[in-house]
Amino acid sequence: MPERSVRRNLALLLWVVLPFTGSVGCATTAKVSGFDVMAVAGARYAQAVDELLVTSGRVLVDTNSDKLLRTETDFPGSVTAEALAEQDDPLRENLAELALLRRQAGRLSDYFTALDALATTGAVSSFGGQIGAAVADLQALSTTLGTGQLARNPAAAGELAGSVGSLAVRHVQLRELERELEARKETIAEVLHLHQALFEALEAQIAADVAITRQQQYQDEVVGPLVNGAIEDPVAWKARRQELLAPAAIHQQLAAAASAAETLRTVWARLLAGGLTPADVEAVVAQLSILVDQIGALRESPATPGGG
Amino acid sequence: MPDEQEPQAIPALEEQPALEPDPAVASAGLPDPITKTAVLEALREVEARLFSAPVVAEVKKQPLQQQMEFAQSRLHLTAVITRLNASLMSEIRQRLEAQAPALDAGIGGLTVALTQLEGAAGWAKAIDGVIRLLGKVVSLL
């Protein structure tokens, strides 16, 4: 009765192995899946951050250019080469800081990518296939022990060894993940906290700059033509008014990034506390979707929001 | 610059002795975040007013010399704000860089763990563990 033997052996194996492995099985799978979700979300977030920092730099320069152009238009001859240089120096500082911040975002991306690689390693699933080489050793072992049970059914032995081996590898995988995350939990939380502060600070600056640009555009393209009776294309005028009254995409995007950083930090804490829920996963996926969608929309629009 | 602007701008900065802290920046432990963030906010408000159509229209009524001074002062304010913003970015960036060695160690640790799990040494170790476990089972049969 090889089937009965296999079933009996499997039951015994589970009885013996589970106390050794502690949190294997469904709990282990759930936890590894939690690390997997967090790793993918973190990597996507870090990539979005990189793109957002690039866009922010472009907007900072463009809105500054708008101020220069407006000043020269309002007060011809007032903008000198020295005045331009005075604008350029701090802008270069901003761009240099953003470049360095991108490097830090890249480091965070590398971390989450490494976390993803360990959480999704193929070692667990491929173990069963590779264990065949050990079957001969197992046969020798069982013969030595005098039972002959496994020696009479090498296929069952291989199957069992594969099952136990997968559990063992998964246990090692989880242990390594937990050890690493325990060591790095405060670092990642602090980095995400700083990202939130960064995007809130960037949003404040860019919102102010964009407001000035839009205020000028609204005056020139909406108020001016209306009060002077100079609207040539009413449909285009209405569309432009709609566009300039709507919130700027970059503003929304920076707010979404700050919110995504906060959500990721919360989910990170819950993951490490073993309390990650499907609702947490949905929340982080939803936040990232908003961020990614807005980045996509911004990529297709001019760097200066509202710029025609 | 017209006289009516400066008296409005200077008190706006001085009238904030008890500024509310920026929750995000302050709780991130950034050095001197309250003053810098609050000053930036106040300066941005002043800058927005100086670029507004009513103020520009008023300045254009002034003599040319005053118009030029207004324009240059306004640009100078823009440059100051840009520099302060860079300084704030720099503080956050430095805080992030302070975490970089720990992140690098994490990346290294994860890579090593993955290599060990997937490498020959990892396999041998795991298989050895399986054989020992099976030995226990076989002994029960």
Image (spheres, coloured by chain):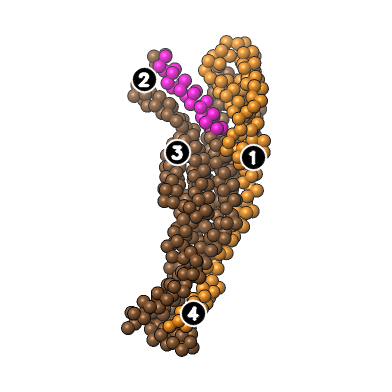
Front: mark 3 or 1:
1
Chain letter, disc 3 residue:
A
Residue type at tag 4: Lys
Front: mark 4 or 2:
4
Pick the residue in front: A139 or A116. Answer: A139
Question: Which residue was labeled with disc 3?
Answer: A298
How far apart are the two marked residues, 1 and 2, measured between alpha carbons?
52 Å
Question: Which residue was labeled with disc 2?
Answer: A232
Q: Answer few, some or many: residues within 10 Å of disc 4's Cα (few below 14, many 20 plus, some between 14 and 19).
A: some
The hue used for chain B is orange
Judge if badges 4 and 3 mark residues of a common chain.
no
Chain letter, disc 2 residue:
A
For mark 1, give the secondary structure. Answer: loop
The hue used for chain A is brown
For mark 2, give the secondary structure. Answer: loop
Pick the residue in front: B127 or A9. Answer: A9
Residue type at tag 1: Leu
Question: Which residue was labeled with disc 1?
Answer: B30
How far apart are the two marked residues, 4 and 2, measured between alpha carbons?
90 Å
Question: Which residue was labeled with disc 4?
Answer: B136
Q: Answer few, some or many: residues within 10 Å of disc 1's Cα (few below 14, many 20 plus, some between 14 and 19).
A: some
CB of mark 1 within 8 Å of CB of mark 4? Answer: no
Residue located 42% across and 76% down the image: A12
Picture quarter with the C terminus of chain B = bottom left
Q: Which residues are magenta?
A: A204-227
Residue A6 falls left or right of residue A19? left
